[in-house]
Structures are given as structure tokens and as C-alpha cells.
Image (tube, helix red, strand yellow):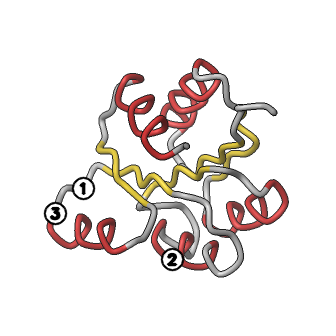
């Protein structure tokens, strides 16, 4: 049985996608999709059925990260890591209210990403 996990990243900033991809591969997992919008992410998640989703709080398109995760969770229960540069009370409360989720704050390092990915994957 393989311990490789399938991961999707939902982020509209290319540097963050590359950072996550580098760490995912370093940890021995597979990045099975990347999306810049919530709408695109939902299509990828439905098709790929990932083990973990990293999602920016603010996205291109009509859906933000929280709305994207809410819709995703209607059919797919993957754990979520919210990526954000916002540390305001409202954003922190929204992250805390989502089951099987945690946050990582920008700017983040490869070590930061590795820590949260290891924490969220069994």
C-alpha cells in the first residue's frame, strides 16, 4: 500500500503554487491539480478526489476559499489547509469554524508548508 497522498492546491499566485508543489514532491506526495479559482478547483477536486486540499482564502473568480471548501465538502470530505496573509479576527474565526482544517500564514517557508501538510495527513 502506497503512502503517497494526492494533493490539490487552489491559489492564484504562481509563487505560492510552486512553493507548495516543491514541498509536496519533497514529502513524497503527488500534486494532482492546481487551480486559480474556486470554480476550477471544484472541477479538479471532483475528478481527482484528493487526500488534502490547500486553498487560498482570497481567489480569482466568484468564490472565495471558504465558499469553495463549503461546496467541496458537500461531496468530498478532504482535510483543508487555508493559506492566507490575513490574520484578522474574522478570518481566524472562519478558519477555526471549518472541521478538519487549519491555516498557514503568508509569507510562508517550505518548512511551514511541510509542517502543516504532515499535520493534516495521516
Q: Is residue 80 above or below residue 68?
A: above
- Quick one: SS at disc 3? loop
- Quick one: SS at disc 2? helix
Q: Quadrant of the C terminus?
A: top right
Disc 1 to disc 3, C-alpha distance: 6 Å
Q: Nearer the viewer, residue 21 or 60?
A: 21
How far across and how far down the image is residue 49, in percent?
77, 57
Label at residue 51: none
Taking the image as shown, residue 45 lies to the left or right of residue 38, namely: right
First in residue order: circle 2 vs circle 3:
2
Contact between labelled residues 2 and 1, with CB atoms less than 8 Å apart: no
Tell me how many marks there are: 3
Q: Nearer the viewer, residue 116 or 56?
A: 116
Q: Which residue is mark 2?
A: 67
Question: Residue shown at 30%/35% (left/top)?
Answer: 107
Q: Which residue is mark 1?
A: 86
Taking the image as shown, residue 53 lies to the left or right of residue 30, namely: left
Q: Which residue is mark 3?
A: 88
Q: Quadrant of the N terminus?
A: top right
Amino acid at each position: 500500500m502506497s503512502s503517497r497522498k494526492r494533493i490539490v492546491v487552489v491559489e492564484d499566485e504562481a509563487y505560492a503554487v510552486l512553493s507548495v508543489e516543491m514541498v509536496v514532491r519533497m514529502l513524497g506526495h503527488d500534486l494532482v491539480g492546481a487551480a486559480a479559482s474556486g470554480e476550477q478547483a471544484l472541477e479538479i477536486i471532483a475528478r481527482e478526489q484528493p487526500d488534502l486540499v490547500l486553498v487560498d482564502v482570497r481567489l480569482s473568480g466568484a468564490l472565495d476559499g471558504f465558499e469553495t471548501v463549503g461546496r467541496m465538502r458537500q461531496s468530498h470530505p478532504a482535510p483543508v489547509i487555508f493559506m492566507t496573509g490575513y490574520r484578522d479576527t474574522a478570518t481566524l474565526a472562519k478558519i477555526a469554524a471549518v472541521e478538519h482544517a487549519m491555516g498557514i500564514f503568508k509569507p510562508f517557508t517550505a518548512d511551514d508548508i511541510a509542517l502543516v501538510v504532515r499535520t493534516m495527513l495521516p
